[in-house]
């Protein structure tokens, strides 16, 4: 797309399952002022139960993690020239366009269509590739996993400090306590708690580095008056 010419570009899968008749509606929406026109599947009747359930679950998971995503939209879309030019300012190598394009904020429209049954051959998009795409989508746009690790580290570290305090109390209160038990348990829990807390802090700094390295534009000026 970054090398193609034209005022508007349309991307479509090469298996031709997407309805070509939707292109006319996309162009009409573009003529009405939409810079981005998303092709949306009306339903997933042509997919297997496994593919349908995992795909819909994936969209819901990304939305729950704060990723801006168009439900049931893949890569069938129209982009105006200025949207394509703004994509150049995104310097990251692993482009997850389904999440990146909605973040650009240009006027958009939706065009619904029916996806055809595969005419010939079998899909080359294996489960491993789908999992890789899913992981890329999550890690490219959400800091939630790192924040979860931070929160988990804080909770477990507090629990560890509490266990260390409990072992110390048992040592002085319970005369039947096994000699040497507290001196083993307290350092174990204390060190474990400190390590998990430090990992949580490191996770927060990694989240900031992760955001900075993408070098995405902080804002886009649509027009100057």
Image (cartoon, grey):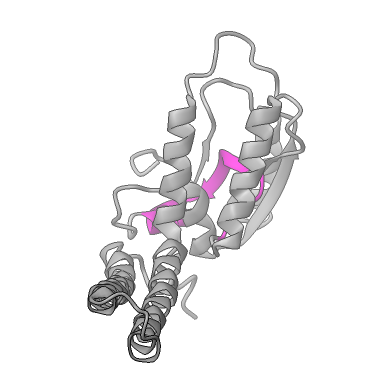
Q: Nearer the viewer, residue 171 or 1?
A: 171
Image point 54% across, 32% down: which residue?
Answer: 12
Q: Outermost residue toward the front?
A: 176
Tally the numbered discs: 0
Q: Position of residue 219 (x, y in %)?
A: 42, 74
Residue bounds of the magenta highlight: 68-87
Image position of 140 (left or right of 62) = left
Q: Position of residue 218 (x, y in %)?
A: 38, 74
Image position of 78 (left or right of 21) = left
**85 within the magenta span:** yes
Q: Position of residue 135 (x, y in %)?
A: 43, 46
The quadrant of the picture occupied by the N terminus is: top left
Residue 161 quadrant: bottom left
Q: Is residue 26 above or below residue 65?
A: above
Image point 71% across, 44% down: which residue?
Answer: 111
Q: Is residue 144 above or below residue 125?
A: below
Q: Outermost residue toward the top?
A: 120
Q: Position of residue 63 (x, y in %)?
A: 60, 58
Image point 46% across, 65% down: which residue?
Answer: 144
**18 within the magenta span:** no
Image position of 55 (left or right of 90) = right
Residue 18 visible, this angle:
yes
Residue 165 quadrant: bottom left
């Amino acid at each position: 797309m970054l090398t193609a010419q034209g005022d508007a570009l349309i991307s479509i899968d090469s298996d031709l399952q997407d309805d070509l008749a939707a292109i006319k509606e996309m162009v009409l929406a573009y003529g009405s002022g939409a810079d981005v026109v998303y092709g949306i599947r009306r339903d997933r009747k042509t997919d297997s139960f496994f593919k349908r359930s995992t795909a819909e679950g994936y969209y819901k998971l990304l939305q729950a993690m704060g990723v801006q995503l168009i439900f049931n939209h893949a890569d069938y879309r129209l982009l105006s020239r200025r949207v394509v030019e703004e994509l150049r300012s995104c310097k990251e190598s692993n482009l997850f366009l389904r999440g990146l394009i909605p973040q650009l904020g240009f006027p958009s429209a939706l065009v619904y269509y029916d996806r055809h049954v595969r005419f010939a051959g079998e899909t080359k998009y294996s489960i491993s590739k789908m999992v890789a795409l899913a992981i890329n989508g999550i890690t490219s746009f959400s800091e939630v996993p790192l924040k979860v690790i931070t929160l988990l580290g804080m909770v477990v570290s507090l629990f560890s400090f509490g266990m260390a305090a409990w072992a110390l109390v048992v040592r002085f209160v319970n005369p039947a306590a096994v000699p040497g038990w507290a001196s083993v348990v307290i350092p174990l829990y204390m060190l474990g708690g400190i390590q998990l807390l430090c990992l949580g802090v490191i996770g927060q700094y990694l989240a900031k580095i992760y955001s900075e390295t993408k070098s995405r534009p902080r804002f886009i000026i649509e027009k100057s008056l």
